[in-house]
Image (tube, rainbow, N blue to C red):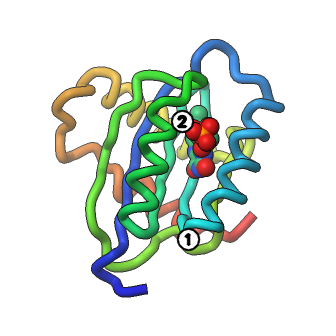
């Protein structure tokens, strides 16, 4: 794939109501199969009712997937943290690498909570110093599940 065509979007959102484990599984399984058809890779974290998802792949595919995800009523308060062209994939290991809350270290949980609080406090104008790239780098380096 030509490097210029690669796009990455990172967003956070909050689950609507209590999302049952089966519903989460359904989202994840759907994401895995649909994303692999579209050459989209990424990461999904879910902790304390908050999603963080990274989607990377061809710009058109990522954009149309984001339109579908935005319409999904199972979550709300979607805030895009980052969106733009990238040279390489950071999460090439899987069409959707899901990390369950129980697999997050104490430090990662803390960092995730701080990030989601910062986003909730400043949904319109995100400060540059969120530490998002450092936070994500820890997962990009992670072993495939
Ligand atoms: C937090 C969250 C993340 C999602 N991630 C993906 C994804 O990566 N890929 C995907 O195909 N669907 C994902 N979905 C599901 C889509 O929102 C949507 O239900 C699905 O693409 C089917 O769309 P359609 O009914 O318009 O065809 C996600 C849903 C939620 C709530």
x, y percent for residue 18 = 69, 16
Query: Which residue occupies the extreme bottom position in the image?
Result: 2
Q: Tell me the quadrant of the picture where the C terminus can be found.
A: bottom right
Say which label, 1 or 2, has the lower sequence index: 1
Residue at image mark 2 = 51
**Image position of 2 with respect to 137: above or below:** below
Residue at 33% x, 40% y: name it.
80
Note whether residue 82 is visible: yes
Q: Tell me the quadrant of the picture where the N terminus can be found.
A: bottom left
x, y percent for residue 14 = 51, 25
Left or right for 64, reference 45 = left
Q: How packed is label 1: few (under 14 Cα within 10 Å), some, or many (20 or more)?
A: some
Disc sitting over residue 117 in the figure: none
Q: In the rendered image, which quarter is residue 88 located in?
A: bottom left
Secondary structure at numbered mark 1: loop
Q: In the rendered image, which quarter is residue 79 located in?
A: top left
Residue at 56% x, 66% y: name it.
38
Distance from Cα at disc 1 to Cα at disc 2: 21 Å
Q: Nearer the viewer, residue 106 or 140?
A: 140
Residue at image mark 1 = 39
**Image position of 47 with respect to 104: above or below:** above
x, y percent for residue 66 = 43, 45
């Amino acid at each position: 794939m030509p490097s210029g065509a690669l796009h990455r979007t990172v967003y956070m959102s909050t689950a609507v109501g209590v999302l049952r484990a089966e519903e989460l599984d359904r989202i994840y399984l759907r994401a895995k199969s649909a994303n692999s058809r579209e050459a989209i890779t990424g990461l999904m974290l879910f902790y304390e009712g908050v999603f963080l998802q990274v989607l990377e792949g061809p710009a058109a595919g990522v954009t149309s997937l984001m339109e579908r995800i935005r319409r999904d009523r199972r979550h709300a308060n979607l805030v895009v943290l980052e969106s733009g062209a990238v040279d390489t994939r950071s999460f090439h290991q899987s069409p959707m690498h899901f990390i369950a809350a129980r697999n997050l270290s104490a430090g990662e949980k803390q960092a995730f909570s701080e990030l989601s609080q910062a986003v909730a406090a400043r949904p319109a104008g995100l400060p540059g110093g969120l530490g998002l790239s450092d936070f994500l780098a820890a997962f990009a380096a992670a072993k495939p599940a």
